[in-house]
Amino acid sequence: MSNTKTRSVPEQAAPTAAAPAPKPVNARRRRPALIGLSVALIAVGGLIGAMTLTAAGQREDVLVVAKPLAFGQVITRGDLAVASISLDPALKPVGAGRLDSIIGKHASAQLLPGTTLTQADVTSDSLVQPGQQLVGLLVKPGQLPTTTLVPGEKVLIVSTPGQNPATDTGASAGAPSTLPAQVVRVGTADSSGNLTVDVSVDANAGATLAARASTGNIAIIVQSPSAVG
């Protein structure tokens, strides 16, 4: 009989699941940083929106042009209206409370209805200065450029054939006589295209220009800005 002994093999324990690897430190720190950044951006956006609404809510009553105003025209109460606009530091509009100080002044430029009035748009100076006279000229098509004349424009009034240049101020032999003038007001052309233009000239030339204009032998030349002294 054999004495061989047998040993039982101990059962191996079932393998246990591996423990999850720890998250990198950077990944754990990044999430709170992103949340903080998002909160900061939202706060900044809200602040900008609040500032925009506040600025939009700041409005001021200012003067605006209600009727067309020609350069040099005297401003009346009916030429202006009051409007409420948002403040614009670069615009520098005339406040509605200054209406009385604006009445009686002159437009320093051609102003269209709806234009916000600024201090640069008005002046105390008249287009007809002391020592000048106002003369009305009736001109026909061909006696002035087709380009529309505007108040304040510098022009030359030229004697055309039919006049005696020697009798006019500033005449020289062989050259037509000219008189410098400034456009003050331009009328409305009639059915034939005839137009009345008011110009200011030196007082010593007013009578000469009026006599010349009565014959119709005149023409208007517009001077270039570089020629105006």
Image (tube, rainbow, N blue to C red):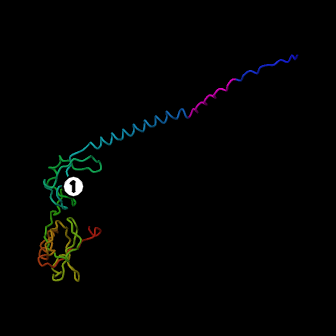
Callout 1: helix, strand or loop? loop
Q: Residue furthest right?
A: 1
Count of numbered labels shown in the rendering: 1
Say what amino acid the circle numbered 1 marks: Gly
Q: Quadrant of residue 227?
A: bottom left
User: Mark 1, residues whose alpha carbon is within 10 Å: few (<14), some, or many (≥20)?
Assistant: some
Residue lying at 16% horizontally and 60% vertically, measured from the top left? 73
**Closer to us: 211 or 43:** 43
| Residue 38 image position (x, y, % from top left) | 44, 37
- Where does the N terminus fall, quadrant-wise? top right
Residue lying at 83% horizontally and 17% vertically, measured from the top left? 5
Is 152 a magenta residue? Answer: no
Residue lying at 36% horizontally and 41% vertically, measured from the top left? 48
Instruction: Let me know if residue 170 appears in the view.
Output: no
Q: Quadrant of residue 228?
A: bottom left
- Which residue is the site of mark 1? 114
Instruction: Let me know if residue 59 appears in the view.
Output: yes
Secondary structure mostly seen in magenta is loop
**Closer to us: 62 or 83:** 83
- Where does the C terminus fall, quadrant-wise? bottom left
Is 135 located above or below residue 10 in the figure? below
| Residue 167 image position (x, y, % from top left) | 15, 79
Is 18 a magenta residue? Answer: yes
| Stretch in magenta | 13-26
| Residue 35 image position (x, y, % from top left) | 46, 35
Is 81 located above or below residue 144 in the figure? above
